Structure formats: C-alpha cells, structure tokens
Image (cartoon, rainbow, N blue to C red):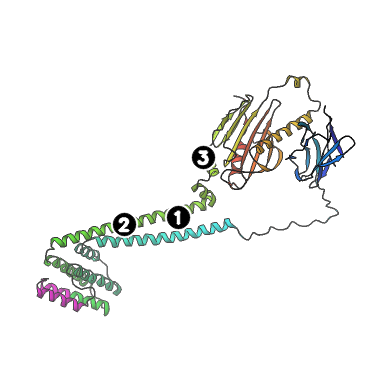
Amino acid sequence: MISVFLWSQEKAELKVGVDTTTVKIGEQLNYILQIKADSTAQVIFPEQPIFAPFELLEESTIDTLRAQSHFLYTKKYALIQFDSGNYFLPQQQVLVNGFSKIADLIPIRVNPVVVDTIQQPLFDIKPLTGIEKNYDALIVKILWGLVAGLLLLGVMYTYLFQKRKKELRERELPPYERAIEDLKALEGKTLKKQEEFKEYYSRLTDVVRRYLEEEAKIDALESTSEELLIKLQLRKDAGTLDLDRSTLKSLRAVLQNADLVKFAKSLPEKYTANEDRKVVELVVIETKEVLPAPTEEELKEKEAYQEYLKQKRRKELWIWGVSGVALVTILALVVSMLIYGYYPVKDTLFRNPTKLLTSGQWVKSQYGTPPLGIETPEVLERISSSDQLIQQFRFGTFDSPFYIDLLFDFPKPDPNDAETPPSDPEQADLEKGQALVNSIISSFESKGAVNILMKNDAITLPSEIPVAKIYGTLDYPKKKKQERVRCNFSAYLFTFEQGTIIVTLMYEKEDRYGADIEQRIVNSLELIKEL
C-alpha cells in the first residue's frame, strides 16, 4: 500500500493511501483515510466526499482501533473509473478537534483492457436490430393522411359552399324575379339530344309551377298538368286570377309538349322549345299583372320574411367562412409540419422556451478583461461582487430552461510566489486544475445539485483556442417541479498564468434544443487580442 503522511503541530496524524496506483478500466480501487489521535479527540470525516472523476461505489463505517496511548480511526472508500487515462484522486478533508487535516493528491493510472486478437477468435459485427415502432415515420404517415383528407374536405367544402350560397341567394329573391332569372338562364340553350330536351322542359315547367304556387297560392308542384290547368280555370271563373284564355291555351300546349318529352321521349324542334319558354315567361308576367295588390299587412310580412332570410344567409355565410378559415389553417399547419418537422412546429406554437431562444435574435458581445467574445440569446447581466478582481456575467438561473455563467477570476499576484517558483510546475498545474474542478462542483452543490457525474477533456475551439472542458450530468431541484430534474452541464476553462475564464452552461437533459444552443455558443467563443 502506498501512503502519504501529513504531520502538523498537533498530535493527530493523517494517513491516506490506496491499495494500488494502477488499475484497469472497471476495476475497483480502495481508498483509505486513517487518523491517529488521542482518545479524547473529536474526529469528523467528510460527509459527502468528492472523488471526481472517479465514481464512489461504497464507503465503510468508521473503524476504531485502540492502541497503547492513542486511537486509530479508519474509513475506507471503494472507487471505480470506466475511462482510461492519468488521474488524480482529489484531496479529502478530515476535522480533528475543529482543525483541518488535508490529504495529498494521489496519482492514479487507469489502463485500458488489452484484447488478445490472436488467441481469441473474432466475430462479425452483429447487424442492426430493427426497431418495431418508428414514431417519426408514423407521424409523417399520419400527416400525409391528414393532408389528403384535408384536401378532399376542401374540395367538398368548396362545392357545398357554392351550392349553399346559390340556394340562399335564390331564396332571397322574390318569386317573380327568381322566375324571370331562371327563364333567362334557359334562353340560348343548345339542345340536341333527347336527355337535353327532357332536362330543359323539366326546368321550364318547374319554374312556372313554383311561381304559381308561391305567388298565386295554387298547389301546383304536386299537381299533374291537367289538374293544374283545371285549378287555373277555376280561379279564372271565380275572378281571383283573371288570366287570358289564349294564355291558358298556350300554357296547356307547353305542358303537353313537356309531358311528351319527359314521358314519351319525343324530340321537338329547337324553335318549339324556345317558343315554349316565351309562353311560360308570358304566363309569369301576366300572372304578376292580374294578381291583386298585396295589402299593407302582407307587405310587412313579406318584408319581415326577406329580412329573416338575409340574417339567416349572413349567419350561414359566417359559419361557412369560419369553417373555411379553420380548414385552411389546419392544412397549413400540417404542411408546415411536413416541411419543418412535427416538434419544431409544435414547440413554436406552444412557445417552448429553448425553441424561442434558438429562433430569437442573438447578441454578439465582448465581456471582461481580457475581453472574451461570445454570442448569446440575450445580453449577459453583470453580477456585482464584493471582490473587485472577479468579474461575473450571467443569463438566467439554475431554474431557467438554459443557464449561462461567465466568470473572470484574475487575482493579484503574490510577491512571494514570484520569488519562489514551484519546484514541480506540472504538479502545480494539476493542483490548480483540481482546484478549479472542485470550485465548479462546489458551485453546483451550493445550489442544491446532487448525483453529479462528470468527465474532463481537452478540446480546441473553432477559433483555434485550446480549452479544458468539464462536462457531465446532475440532478437539480427546479422550482415548480415535484422531482429533481436531470440536467447536462458543461464548463469551458481558459487558463492563464494570471487567472482563469470559466464559461458554464446548464440545461435539462431531455431538452431537444439545449445541445444546439450550447454548440452555437461554444462556436462563437474567441479571445479578443486587439481592441
């Protein structure tokens, strides 16, 4: 076992050790803290020890062993690491009678597992396993089905709307004007086939029958041609509808021609059909002339009825209009989802906070000394600090959908350090880096974060600046959330001899746009060399 001993002016003595400094990936490493102290000493081990980047598997209870003149307090920790590389076990603090005892850093080498490709047989890579449910493909199919359905509804809506509009317009016209308009529509019809003549005479007789029923109050629509003529003759004899005998005779001829065409499939001459239309028009005009003038009460009733029809038409047109707008809106929404994707359109409509950040107007600014250029969704707010050597800028809080913190820490140089440079510069850099890592973890823990898992890496920004990246996940108790939310965090460190610039980002792990926002911010980072 390798142990590091720290002595102080007090009698208490701290020993720290590991069972080995070289382990393989996934191999357990035992870390031991031991305090030699008086029997009356109060010893407090760290309640929540931090061994990042190692993971804590378990910790033992405090083992107390009594010697001749002192006690030995021992506590063991089981650690593990799944990434190869060179690491340092961070310093741990033990309190003895209120005095702090600090253990030294211990270097650990984690070796990869060497695979023997000669002795062990190699196998082909297994093929990809198909996923039974592809929700993206299902959503696309549903959207295309909606497009087809909406287009079909649009065609039906247009047809029904135009048809209903025409019906309402016809109902608003007085019977005489509507009959004359229908007869004008039959004028100039080109008739060749028997079916065309049949349709022509059906519409022609329907015009005169409807007009007589509405204006002369004769039951004409449900009567045969002969019954209709008898009813007209009776009204003439009674003096309530004084039509000319020649007009009645001509109408009889028209009705007979219509019956022959509809039931006997006769084919009259074209001029005969045109003359019959003129006869019907004459019957309508003459009926209008011989009808008694409506009384004042009838006029009021007719006017009230016309007003009712207009209001009904306006109401129905409004309903049809709203339905049309809704149909077009839904169609536009579905097409937008097919073009831009389901989630971008959905998140835009429901104003997803991080989606709004990606779509908003970003700001490119410079902050701190030395100046750092960074592009953010909004201007970072300066945070006042009692320490004038620390400059801090921030966007949002830990409870916000996206959190940005920019810290400039450039302390005044210590004259003693300048006179006595460190004996081991590499060890000093490692200790400085570990101190920065501990400060970042402490910052998260002070806000209530737990279950912090982290890694570190060295990357080069698009601006060709090398930085240290510390990233991982944590659980944070966000406001208005019943359970802790798993979040991603990243810290980018610009280290100088005089100090450090730290850019910290945090967002929910399940956020669809958090990674894109982070990447855009990181791509914009650059140190301003010339002002």
Label 1: few (<14), some (14–19) or many (≥20) C-alpha neighbours in 10 Å: many
Kindly report which numbered mark, 1 or 2, lies closer to the viewer in this rendering.
2
Determine whether, in the image, residue 206 is placed left or right of residue 329. left
Determine whether, in the image, residue 438 is placed left or right of residue 286. right
Specify start and end residues of the magenta stretch as a single range. 224-252
Q: Secondary structure at mark 1?
A: helix
Q: Residue 99 at x, y = what percent?
A: 77, 30
Q: On the image, numbered disc 1 is attached to which residue?
A: 331
- Tell me the amino acid under the disc marked 2: Lys
Could you tell me how far apart the alpha carbons at marks 1 and 2 are, in whole angstroms? Answer: 24 Å
Q: Main secondary structure of the magenta part?
A: helix
Kindly report which numbered mark, 3 or 2, lies closer to the viewer in this rendering.
2
Q: On the image, numbered disc 2 is attached to which residue?
A: 315
Residue 319, placed above or below residue 260:
above
Q: Residue at x 71, y 22 (%)?
A: 413
For residue 127: magenta?
Answer: no
Q: On the image, numbered disc 3 is attached to which residue?
A: 360
Q: Residue 130 at x, y = what percent?
A: 66, 59
The quarter of the picture where residue 294 lies is bottom left
Q: Residue at x 86, y 38 (%)?
A: 2
For residue 242: magenta?
Answer: yes
